[in-house]
Image (cartoon, helix red, strand yellow):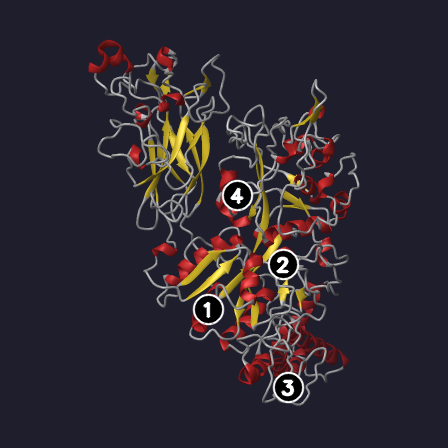
Amino acid sequence: MRVRDRSPRGLGWWTRAWSAAVAAWSVVALLAVLPLGAGTVPQAHADSGSSAKTVAAQPPWIPATKTYGTAGTVTVSSVTNLTDQMLHVSWTGFTPSVNRVGGAQATKVSFGSNVVLYPVRVYECRGADPKITDCYGSTLFGGDATAGFQQPARPAGTTTPDLPSNAQIAVTGADGTGSADIEVWTAAQSPNLGCDNTHACSVVVEPNYGGDPLANTQSHLHGKNGDPSPACEDRAYDTSNIWQVYAATDLVTKKGNAVNGDWSGEACSWTHRTVVPLSFAPTPNSCAAANSDFGTAGSALAERAIQQWRTGACLNDNPINAGYTSLSESMTRQQFGQGGGADVGLVLRPDSAPATRPYVYTPLANSAVTVAFLVDDPTTGKQIGQMKLNARLLAKELTQSYTESAASVAPQSVAGNPDCLFSDPEFLALNPASSIAPLQWPSCTDGTPNSLPIVLGNSSDMIYQLTSWIAADPDASNFLEGQPDDWGMRVDPSFLRSSSYAGFPTDILAPRDSSGWQTTNSNGVVISLDQKLYEWSPVLSGLDDAVRDFLSYTPTCQNPNVNGTGGHDHCVAQPRGTRQLIAIMDNADAQDFSLPAAQLVNPSGTAVAPSIRTMQAAVNDMPLDPTTGTRELPYGVPNTPFTVDSQAYPLTVVQYAMAPTANLGSKSIAISNFLQQITNQGGGQLYGVNPGNLAPGWASLTPAQLNDAQAALAHVTAQDGAYPGNQQPPANPAAGNNGSTQSTTANQAAQTTPNNSTGDNASSSGSGSSGSTGADTGSTGDTGTTGSTTGAAPTDKTGAAPSASPSSPAMQQAALGTPTADRSGAARLLMPVVLIAGAVLLVGGPAALVVGGTAFGARVLSRLRRFTGGS
């Protein structure tokens, strides 16, 4: 039996007891000061239910043995919970596509071509067991389903009634594998397909293995009295030029039946089809018919997120019906500021002008401006999967500074510059051949400006964000001011800043150079081709159309040569395998369409691609602007966390809602609840494709932003007349200002609203006795009976100066403060934590003193010393 030492406690006892007490106090103190919301928001994901599906395909035709082989497979990348998105369709065990002349492996093919044997078409079709008349863009879409292929050609335009065809055509490699990417549409994009959560659709993969779909043999033997039925095992016409048929090429789809003229060219290919059923997620159209409870308008970039949030809100047990209209942010700010337009404005940048009506900015989520690319290896036709770009390279692309022509006919304005991006030494230094080996970058195609970016031509905050980043980069800025790059390339002088051109940043991109190659004819007359005028045309019909041009591989340029009608033909689509396309778009579209995104070089010199991680890293570098209560990247400002953050994606943006804090009437509850659902970590901030979740391509709010949102929504809910940030009501309030009734509420709300991530308290001022504000705590005087008081939105101690308006000719740079780490309002909880800590210490301190003198305490301390490396 162990006998307890009863000797008096000496100095060693006090040492052990004191150590135990210090350990207890240290743990409690650490818990007291640790920020409860430190770090980023956990990356919660909803179960999307999306999955790939592989099905058996039809047996392939083997031309060498004139027999059928072993059946392969077809795989579709996702088949459930679909939206308007890109699907990757791949296959194995198909007949290899070869060139009709020479028999070499084919690397590209186009619709209607007679060059390639055994091509493959891919369709989106309505129904789970579709007929050829159900497949959008097929030869007979919209025709008589009961007649099949025994019907005349469809009238012009009726096979693509909603949008240009989304059908794809591709080749199969020598190993029997191939792939294509197809954009699948919901009923919102194509009412004639009608795909939604209650109407199934499908992907159909249709290889052309030849045969006689046009009844040529019957026509040859019996003329018009022959049997018009397809003879799909008759191979006489597969590669033959009898009647210029080439039945195993896609040309056969452009021919009528030789007996009766019916449009049966796809009849034999259809017998080899593989069908993969698809199911679609609910959309706002899935909601019960109802009038909108309120309207939203603004950012086209927000569309995918807003539509998914709208769907979730209207399908809830207590449905909220929110309208949405895509509108330029500049028009949104103008209409909203005047009290017109939609109830809620959606913008990426705050209005730099003082607020003329009570409202606040509520952060909804984070996204990015993305530079997508589709570039193919010129030898193999395979798609290149990575690309790095910096601000100066994009400045060159957006200022028509490449010649886009052979040196001998280069316009004088850009003479001596590289032909295109892929011959630019700066691009090749950033993207060496080894980085994509064994693939290779394509060469420039003289006279075909393929690599100039497809970009929105309307006023847009996306464009302002892009050009602000470019203008703030030292190398790009010097280039735009006329200094050559390290290899001697200069900016097109039409884009030099002048009295008629403000330069970057700008919210609108447009061509400015209309010059061209000049020559003198035999009569001494100078002739100019003016090719620069036609090489680049930003898209004026909206972001959706810009994205769709990119998805159809169609550069937005025109042929500089005059056609037969005196006009200029649009540039034709580039066949898969020869693409040299770049586009500026939103990250959500790039994600949904599975498009590769360029890595952009940030201020730290690191090339990063957009992702949840890199977007949230950038958001954590955004200081809070005390004037507006919003956050933006501090472009061009030295010595900020952003300048050294290797993880930050440089074109990250925050989607804001301009939400009124007065005069909403009965709409206030619906708007407040809708925005609460969006900013809820278990709802609108939960990643997924289900209704109400945060759509792909977006990053959830950080703890600091969640705190910003809660503070803003407190004002929206209370309808207290608050103004953005620390702004005060104008001296002569616009219609809709709430006067003294709202002033009192605003003061009260300002004192009870949770603080922002820096721990500063919001402040407000009244028209009664004077109030004072301090650095850490704001106090208000007594509320007056007249006048207007606003509760200020949370402010950082070292906040950013307001950003320039998108309409401003130049971005005014101001010293921006260093954003503090995310703490999610820990400061406002500090006092309760300290009180709890004090209570724990009252017990823990004496307990430690007692335990420290026991054998048990000695053992604990001994182990603690060993753990910490002590003796």
Question: Who comes first in sequence, dot 3 or dot 1?
Answer: 1
Q: Residues within 10 Å of mark 4 (few under 14, many from 20)?
A: many
Mark carried by residue 546: 4
Q: Viewer-proximal residue, 434 or 467?
A: 467
Quadrant of res 128 = top left
Q: Viewer-proximal residue, 607 or 357?
A: 357
Residue shown at the point (77%, 80%) measured from the top left: 11
Q: Which residue is mark 1?
A: 671
Q: Amino acid at mark 3?
A: Ser
Question: Who comes first in sequence, dot 3 or dot 4?
Answer: 4
Q: Amino acid at mark 4?
A: Ala
Question: Who comes first in sequence, dot 1 or dot 4?
Answer: 4
Residue shown at the point (49%, 19%) measured from the top left: 105
Of marks 3 and 2, the one in the foreground? 3
Helix, strand or loop under label 2: helix
Q: Residue 584 vs residue 772: left or right? A: left
Q: Viewer-proximal residue, 293 or 370?
A: 293
The correct choice, above or below, for 735 with respect to 134 in the image is below
- Placement of the N terminus among the 4 image quadrants: bottom right
The correct choice, above or below, for 310 with respect to 104 in the image is below
Q: Amino acid at mark 1?
A: Ile
Question: Who comes first in sequence, dot 3 or dot 2?
Answer: 2
Q: Which residue is mark 2?
A: 619
Helix, strand or loop under label 4: helix
Q: Which residue is mark 3?
A: 767
Looking at the picture, how far across and down is residue 177, in whole percent?
45, 27
How many angstroms separate mark 3 from mark 4 (CA)? 52 Å
Confirm whether residue 188 shows in the render.
Answer: yes
